[in-house]
Image (cartoon, rainbow, N blue to C red):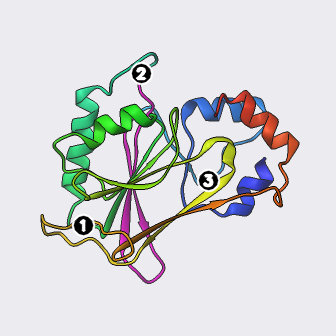
């Protein structure tokens, strides 16, 4: 598992506190690219010779929470407001699950340009939410697919901006068919983590 993480060369990898504890029990030491904690985090990534991208890491919800606390939604809105105009793209990564991510997307905003969702619930190849101002994708169960988002044109700062599939954004799902063999050790680790 540690070797797999190292081979991916992540700029930033979102690892929740729970995932850290499971990985530690399996003997996987934290890597320099690992981020994620019990609070909202903001990170700025500088693309090679290009613009800056903000990444918001949404903290896990309190244990047993069915709804997203309003103060957490306000924190996300305030972070997006503060970042808007200083970066070309604002991406949020969420471990909350489908229903709770929908709560965020119904908030007044401003909201992120892209929401990368995970946790309980269905996977999404990509849907446009928040009046088409947020592209929302969700990982699929058992890691049997890879989602790719291509930003074909950067969002502009005007309030009328909207994502349009194949014009300024493309969201694609690549299924990992039987030609890709599962590693039994990684499969066992994922099952112990309680993932779908």
* Up/down of 63 relative to 180, above or below: above
At 83% from the left and 61% from the top, the residue drawn is 179
Pick whichever, 139 or 14, lies toward us.
Answer: 139
Crowding at mark 2 (Cα within 10 Å: few <14, some 14-19, many 20+): few
Helix, strand or loop at label 2? It is loop
Pick whichever, 53 or 93, lies toward us.
Answer: 93
Indicate the position of residue 47 as horizontal and vertical percent values. Answer: 45, 74
Magenta residues, start to end: 39-62
- Disc sitting over residue 86 in the figure: 1
* Up/down of 184 relative to 71, above or below: below
User: Is tag 2's residue or tag 1's residue first in the polypeptide sequence?
Assistant: 2
Residue named by callout 2: 62
The answer for how far apart the CA atoms under marks 2 and 3 are is 26 Å
The answer for how far apart the CA atoms under marks 2 and 1 are is 31 Å
Q: Please state which of the two labelled residues, at mark 2 or mark 1, is closer to the viewer.
A: 2
Helix, strand or loop at label 1? It is loop
At 57% from the left and 42% from the top, the residue drawn is 15
Indicate the position of residue 9 as horizontal and vertical percent values. Answer: 66, 64
Left/right of residue 11 with respect to residue 93 in the rendered view: right
Residue named by callout 3: 32
Pick whichever, 173 or 61, lies toward us.
Answer: 173
Left/right of residue 63 with respect to residue 176 in the rendered view: left
**Magenta segment includes 42:** yes
Indicate the position of residue 97 as horizontal and vertical percent values. Answer: 46, 34
Numbered circles on residues, count:
3
User: Is tag 3's residue or tag 1's residue first in the polypeptide sequence?
Assistant: 3
Tell me if label 2 and label 3 are in contact, CB under 8 Å: no
At 21% from the left and 61% from the top, the residue drawn is 84
């Amino acid at each position: 598992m540690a070797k797999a993480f190292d081979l991916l060369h992540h700029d930033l990898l979102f690892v929740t506190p729970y995932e850290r504890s499971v990985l530690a029990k399996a003997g996987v030491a934290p890597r320099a690219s690992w981020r994620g904690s019990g609070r909202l985090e903001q990170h700025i990534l500088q693309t090679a010779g290009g613009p800056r991208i903000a990444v918001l890491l949404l903290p896990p919800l309190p244990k047993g929470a069915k709804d997203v606390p309003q103060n957490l939604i306000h924190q996300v809105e305030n972070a997006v407001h503060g970042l808007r105009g200083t970066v070309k793209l604002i991406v949020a990564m969420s471990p909350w699950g489908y229903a709770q991510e929908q709560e965020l997307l119904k908030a007044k905003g401003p909201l992120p340009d892209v929401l990368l969702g995970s946790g309980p619930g269905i996977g999404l190849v990509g849907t446009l939410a928040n009046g088409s101002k947020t592209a929302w994708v969700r990982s699929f169960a058992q890691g049997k697919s890879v989602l790719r988002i291509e930003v074909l044109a950067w969002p502009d700062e005007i309030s009328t901006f909207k994502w349009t599939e194949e014009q300024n954004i493309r969201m694609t799902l690549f299924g990992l068919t039987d030609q890709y063999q599962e590693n039994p050790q990684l499969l066992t680790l994922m099952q112990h983590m309680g993932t779908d």
